[in-house]
Image: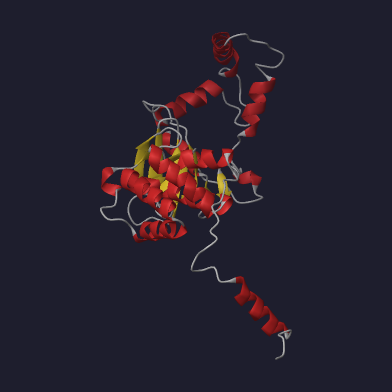
Amino acid sequence: MLDNLREGVLTPDVHDPSLNPLYRDVLHHYGAVALPCRVQDPDRKGKVEAGVAHAQKTPLKGLRLETLDEAQTYLDRWEERWADTRIHGTTKRQVAAMFAEERPALLPLPVEPFRYYQHGERTVHLDGCVEVEAAYYGAPPGWIGRRVRVQWNASHVRLLDPLTGQLLREHLREQRGRHRIKDEDRPRRTPLSTQQLLARAEKAGTQIGALCQSMHRNHGETAVRRILGVLALAKKYGIASTDEACALGLETGAEYHFVRRYLERNPQLPLSLRQVDPLIRQLTLYRDLIEKRTGTEKQP
């Protein structure tokens, strides 16, 4: 029995409270269940704060212990000689005697300690992955554009269904910028969304489209973010500059990072303006149109 602390209870409800998943899993690991009390009803919760204040003010007050071993030895002696032998103020019984009655009902500690994790929600991107600390992890097919719950620690990343809590995928941690996708999750055909993205790149520029097609052939769906990056560069630096940078990238076998660095160092590339082109009309035609629209055309 506990109060509705914010670290543990996300939405108070005496019948169906919403618990912090990390808090809930810690309790489950040690075989305990949280039963939050009614809101603004402190008489129904267990005594938790009093024990902390008792330990701070009684054995530890005014002490300075240099090592953990020294502190543990001191507390063991204090517990054996004073804490266990004292008479509890509320029950009027010896603490050691009450603990002896409760000991048979206690569960043994788990063999392994609880694996602490961080958690959050992510949207599955067009490449079928979610981003966790600048690395990318694949979700099952059919989850593109949907939200999933994510748990991660130093060794694993877990993707869970946000409604049922079912484990969707579990991956080993990957380095920043890299992808980790299970073989069964890799699409056998190019998704429609990726085809449309490649068509946008082709329409943007010949060399832009060629570089994006090359990245997709080499890396599959993991290249989607790089293709989006190239299109963002075209929007920022202009089609002509990006197209020329992509041409250099194709010649040298480089990809997105080369194009980005090249444009950052050469933001204003020389433009090759055409003087003669089927789309460029003669200046006299523009003059005649302006005179006609403004009524300044010469009378015969």
The percent coordinates of residue 87 (x first, y second) are 61, 22
The percent coordinates of residue 120 (x first, y second) are 50, 45
Residue 33 visible? The answer is no
Residue 50 visible? The answer is yes
Q: Which residue is depicted at the point 34% across and 44% down?
A: 219
The percent coordinates of residue 268 (x first, y second) are 60, 45
Q: Residue furthest front?
A: 300
Q: Is residue 266 left or right of residue 108?
A: right
Q: Is residue 210 left or right of residue 97?
A: left
Q: Is residue 43 left or right of residue 97?
A: right
The percent coordinates of residue 24 (x first, y second) are 48, 42
* Quadrant where the image shows the C terminus: bottom right
Q: Which residue is depicted at the point 72% across and 90% down?
A: 299
Nearer the observer, 93 or 294: 294
Nearer the observer, 81 or 18: 18
Q: Which residue is depicted at the point 60% across and 76% down?
A: 285
